[in-house]
Image (cartoon, grey):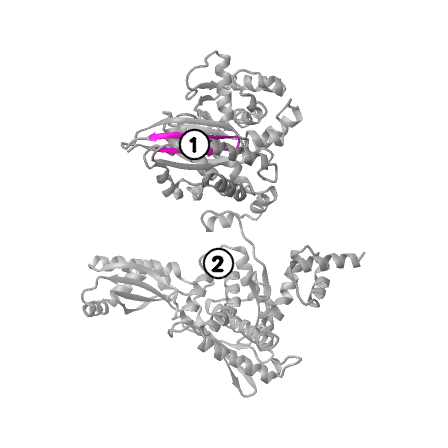
Amino acid sequence: MVENLAIVDLGSNSARMAVTEISPDGKFREIKRVKENTRLSEGMGHEKILQPEAMERTIQAIKHFKRQYQGLPNLQVQAIATAAVRQAKNRQEFLQRVKQETGLTVRVLSGYKEAYYDYLGVVRTLKLNHCLILDVGGASCELVLVQHRKARDLISLPIGAVNLSEQYHLGGYVRSADLFKAQAAVCDRLNKIPWLRYATRMPIVLLGGANRTLARMSRSYRHKNRGSIHGYRLTSRVVYATYRELLSRNLAQRKKMPGLEPDRADIIIGGMLPLVTLLERNSALFFRKAACGKELLPNTFSSAKNGVKTMKNNDLNHDWMHGLYRLPTSQRQQIISDQFSLADDQQALMKENASQLGSQLIENYLTDYRLPEGVVTNLVVNHKTYAVPVVTEEPSVVAAACNGANRAALSGGFMAPAAERAMLGQVVLKNVADPAALNKWLLEHEIEILAVANAAHPSMQRRGGGAKRIRIRPAAPFVSVDLIIGVGEAMGANTVNTMAEAVAHYLKEQGYDVLTAILSNAAFMSLQSAACRVSFKNLATATMNGEVVAQRIAELSQLAQVDPYRAATHNKGIMNGIDALMIASGNDWRAIESGAYAYAASSGQLKGLSTWEIDGDALLGRIKLPLPVGTVGGSIGLNPLTRLNFKINGIHSAGELARVAASLGLAQNLAALRALATSGIQAGHMQMQYRSLAVAVGATAAEVPVLVKRLKKLPQVNQNVAKQALQELRKDSL
């Protein structure tokens, strides 16, 4: 059965419709093509707002298209939009109007996808192994570097015929100053694309309305007005000559030039700017012309019966994100800037905060995201006083930690004993026919298994660590062979994984079916405890006796042992401090968090990680949790801020770090429970929240403390209230 595919393309300058008839054998032919000049990107300006008149023109064009295709049998309609809609801040409003008034759901193409479709159209219609594709539309410009018929690099720039012409006043007679600014801006854009240097001496394939117009003008001069412009060839000399001729005329004169549509006369110079600028970079090139016309739309969107559907199902491969990881940081930043129309100050922010180290640590690196770092003071652990750098975005964390540490210090501080440090690697077997026989074989070969593990990382054993023993643990229908591994001063994830994979390979050679080999973050063999005894007098408030406070804290602790809802929040307060220290020390805080919560729920119910009880005339607090931390390895030795933090905190071993971390978590917990037991948690939070709010509404450093005092006196505070209070403060100071 013959199907009909209608493609509605809402471009930035014109709207197009192409109807393709698709036969059951996959062959297709175009049966209808219509174009209307809608100028959707007109007047968008720097604000990137679609204008009412432009939206109305476009909607009327869609209605016109609909009247032409709606009677066709077995019809499938696909509507797409490109740069103008993609960049518009009010695009949702426009898309909703289109849906309401025409029934069409419009898919907005990313810049990457638009460029990729250009590539598909070119490689399917032109026999070129290497080329540079340049598609100039009304509000964007796409560039694709093709090598060996593969899209090596591509980018979409937010510059096009309409927005360049409007921004730089290129519609009428062009002043030299305006032209210079426009050419400089385009040149700056192109100079930020490092892979363009590979396009030198390559043929350039031209797509888009401006380039089609250029070809038609050239053909008119040569009196060759018949036939398709697909494949039409131009030289740089012809391009320059046409450009000079256009610049020498005013708008009225341009409208009369052969081959130039009158409604394009005001944007043709802006439309040619990307090509001319590119030519100036890469002189003496040979150019080819492929029109985004009859051949391109069907081949791009309906080359097979289910062509559109196939592209939808492969969005991951065809969108702008594909291959992003291969690019240098500067190019990746530019793609992000162009795709999301980042303002100049936003682009500068991303570039200024980027670091060479960051690009080495993670994939698809953009920039360094900075979090505030503070220091927790007077944390006394095993009679040693620490100043502990921590990293957190939550306003009250550092203040609370200092508060808890100080109260504990007044009563002697925290005691944290040295603890065992070992990690567990899992080698999981499946399809075990005889578990008893497996168990027997593994125990008989334990020494050999340990030797295999240690051979995979011999340096660890030389430092006193390495694989120590195995544990066989059924986890029906699987069996886990647990490797108990000492990791020294490192957290040890890479070491454990290396050893586990070596053992997995060995067991496979013995004929066992191995499912996986990986460490466990349930580091229950790296449990660290800490305790403190805080006298009642160091818990009292101005209005509440210290013994009463202690009793209420003990009751809250009891609640966290029996109620998982309270336990979750109780433990979150503990991890506020521990996570902040882990980040500052370069440790994997996600692993610590995961292990802590696994341990808190190991009884079958989530419970608080800490307990508090009355002990004579004092409150006794205890905590125990897995802390598989490290002072070497990973990013710890690479990040200069991490090394600085270890200089400040004076911690010299992984065991010492674990003891300090457990104590810090208990200090954080003490402060949170005391606040909850007395004035309520919001009182302390709001002190810091007021500061954050003051900064958010624009208060200067000198104004912040004064404004905070005013906000404290108000019954209800939000951003509007804070703004008004700041205005009043400034009036009072005049």
Kindly identify which residue carries mark 2: 636
Please say whether residue 338 is visible from this viewpoint.
Answer: no
Between the residue at mark 2 and the residue at mark 1, the CA separation in whole angstroms equals 45 Å
Using a 10 Å C-alpha cutoff, classify the residue at mark 1 as few (fewer than 14 neighbours), some (14 to 19) or many (20 or more). many
**Amino acid type of the residue tagged 1 in the rendering:** Asp
Furthest residue in direction right, as rendered: 734
When the figure is inspected, residue 218 is found, relative to residue 491, above or below; the finding is above
Q: Is residue 707 left or right of residue 72?
A: right
Q: Which residue is found at the position 38% from the left and 25% from the top?
A: 126
Query: Would you identify the image quadrant in which residue 380 lies?
Result: bottom right
- Is 342 within the magenta? no
Q: Is residue 475 left or right of residue 331?
A: left
Q: Toward the viewer: 148 or 221?
A: 221
Query: Would you identify the image quadrant in which residue 5 lies?
Result: top left
Kindly identify which residue carries mark 1: 118
Circle 2 SS class: loop
What type of secondary structure mainly makes up the magenta span? strand
Return the x and y of residue 559 as percentages of the image width and height: 48, 78
Q: Which residues are magenta?
A: 4-21
**Amino acid type of the residue tagged 2 in the rendering:** Ile
